[in-house]
Image (cartoon, helix red, strand yellow):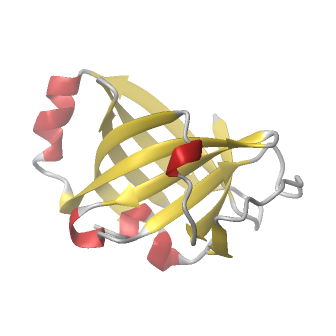
C-alpha cells in the first residue's frame, strides 16, 4: 500500500522556463466519493488507474494504489467516466531538493494553474519558489476530482 503526502498551491508567477519536462495528461473519474476516489489517467504513452482513500490520520496524507492498464482499454473506459474529462499540461519544475508538478488546466478549467509537491513526511520542510501562490491543500474545490 502506498501513501501519498502532498501539498497544493496556486501559481502566481512564471515557471515554464524552469521546467525540465512537460507532459500532456487526460484524466477522468469513475468514483469521486472522498472515501474512495477512482481515477483514470492517460499520459506519456501509458495509462494508470489510481485508487485513493484518506489515510487513517488527520493530515494531508492519503493512501494511493496505481495499476497500469493498456492505453486502448483506458480510452474505452474513459467514455464512461463521470462529468467532464480533464485536460492539462504538467510541468516538472525542480526547486532546491524537490520537484514541483505544475498543472496548467485546459478546457472548462482554463486559467487554473496548481503546483503540487510530494513530501516524505507531513512536517517536512521545503523551500517555496517565488512563483508559488496561496496554499490550497485540503480545499475540496481544488481537488481534480471536483474539477470534472
Position of residue 131 relative to residue 48, above or below, is below
Of the pair 18 and 58, the residue shown nearer to us: 18
Is residue 51 something one can see in this rendering?
A: yes
Residue at position x 29%, y 69% from top?
110
- 66 vs 10, left or right, is left
Most foreground residue, 67 or 5: 5
- Residue 62 in percent (x, y) is at 63, 53
Question: What residue is rendered at 64% in x and 36% in y?
Answer: 2
Query: For residue 99, what is the image quadrant?
Result: top right
**The N terminus - image quarter:** top right
Position in image of residue 142 (x %, y %) = 48, 72
Q: Quadrant of the C terminus?
A: bottom left
The residue lying at 41 percent from left, 62 percent from top is 144
Residue 140, image x and y in percent?
50, 76
Any part of residue 34 in sight? no
Image check: 9 left or right of 130? left
Q: Is residue 43 above or below residue 129?
A: above
Extreme-front residue of the structure? 17
Query: Is 80 situated left or right of 63 in this image?
Result: left
Q: Is residue 83 left or right of residue 24?
A: left
Label total for image: 0
Q: Position of residue 54 (x, y in %)?
A: 61, 59
* 133 or 79: nearer the viewer: 133
At a point 32% along the width and 40% down the height, the residue shown is 24
Residue 4 sits above or below residue 113 on the image: above
Amino acid at each position: 500500500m502506498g501513501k501519498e503526502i502532498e501539498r497544493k498551491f496556486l501559481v502566481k508567477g512564471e515557471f515554464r522556463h524552469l521546467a525540465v519536462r512537460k507532459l500532456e495528461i487526460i484524466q477522468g473519474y469513475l468514483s469521486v466519493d472522498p472515501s474512495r476516489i477512482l481515477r483514470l489517467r492517460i499520459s506519456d504513452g501509458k495509462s494508470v488507474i489510481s485508487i485513493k482513500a484518506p489515510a487513517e490520520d488527520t493530515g494531508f496524507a492519503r493512501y494511493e494504489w496505481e495499476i497500469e492498464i493498456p492505453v486502448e482499454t483506458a480510452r474505452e473506459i474513459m467514455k464512461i467516466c463521470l462529468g467532464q474529462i480533464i485536460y492539462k499540461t504538467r510541468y516538472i519544475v525542480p526547486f532546491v531538493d524537490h520537484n514541483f508538478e505544475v498543472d496548467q488546466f485546459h478546457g472548462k478549467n482554463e486559467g487554473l494553474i496548481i503546483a503540487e509537491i510530494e513530501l516524505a513526511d507531513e512536517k517536512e520542510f521545503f523551500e517555496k519558489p517565488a512563483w508559488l501562490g496561496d496554499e490550497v491543500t485540503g480545499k475540496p474545490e481544488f481537488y481534480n476530482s471536483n474539477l470534472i
